[in-house]
Amino acid sequence: MFTIPLRVSATQQKRLARLLSEPEIVRAGRFHRDRDRERFTVAHGEMRRRLAQQAGVDPASLCFGSASHGKPFIKEPDAARRWRFNLTHSGDFALLAIMDGVSVGIDIEQWQDIRDGPSVARRFFSAAEQSVYMNSAASSRRETFFRIWTRKEAVIKALGFGLSMPLDAFDVCDHNEWLAVPRFRVDRLLDALIPQEGWHLQCLPAPQGYAAALAIQGCCAVNVLHDTVPAQ
């Protein structure tokens, strides 16, 4: 898993832009702000570079598809199909997770002031998560909110349901402490079975002012690499 800085030189942006496919170039062009377009270019260029490096293929050969709820996967080439990945970005950083045949979800969020945090928590958090959030110290409440939020986002990304899955349908912490695994309260959603066991969920080290989390099906060691985009 890689932490990728999105603020890079113009030379690095151009190098990474050359790795993008035509659809990705079109998507980048839809951003009105230069900063958003540049961040998209760096994140997706690095995603192609890292995936190609892992699979031993040319970055230009990678062709992506989307599952029913929008989660991307590698369609071509055959040599790369077994690799599962997830890309997320917020502020000046992106996270990229790459796993061999294992479903994975990650999320990173830059801390922000939450307007009416208790109301947001009641809407999206389970009862246990609301308790953890409301009982946290005022000085750490914002951090607690994003620790919970990133864990929940990582879970729904790993499952591949996106925001079609209710965020309050599962717990990522109990009333007293953070959990090592999410506890699902539903076993079927959108006509799909949700695995009840075999999940690994953890907070990840993140830059100051950010929260990050990872969810993977199965339990394995995760190496977090704080990446730098190589100059050229």
Image (cartoon, grey):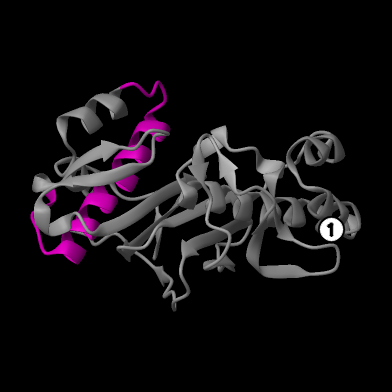
Tell whether position 54 is magenta. Answer: yes
Residue 55: image location, x then y, percent = 16, 63
The residue that appears at 73% across and 39% down in the rendered structure is 124
Amino acid type of the residue that numbered disc 1 sits on in the rendered structure: Val
- Residue located 22% across and 59% down the image: 82
| Residue at 36% from the left image edge and 63% from the top image edge | 102
Q: Nearer the viewer, residue 176 or 139?
A: 176
Q: Is residue 144 placed above or below 180 in the rendered structure?
A: above
50, 11: nearer the viewer:
50
Q: Percent from the top left, x then y, of residue 87?
A: 39, 49
Position of the N terminus by quadrant? bottom left
Find the residue positioned furthest to the bottom: 221
Measuring 20% from the left and 65% from the top, which residue is drawn there? 54
> Is residue 112 in sight in this rendering?
no
Does residue 146 sit above or below 69 in this rendering? below
Specify the segment rendered in magenta: 30-59
Residue 76's spot in the image, x, y percent? 13, 46
Q: Is residue 6 left or right of residue 231?
A: right
The answer to whether residue 226 is left or right of residue 166 is: left
Q: What residue does disc 1 label?
A: 132
Check the picture and name the quadrant holding the C terminus.
bottom left
Instruction: Name the quadrant containing residue 207.
Output: bottom right
Q: On the image, which quarter does residue 121 sit in?
A: top right
Which of the 4 quarters of the picture holds residue 172? bottom right
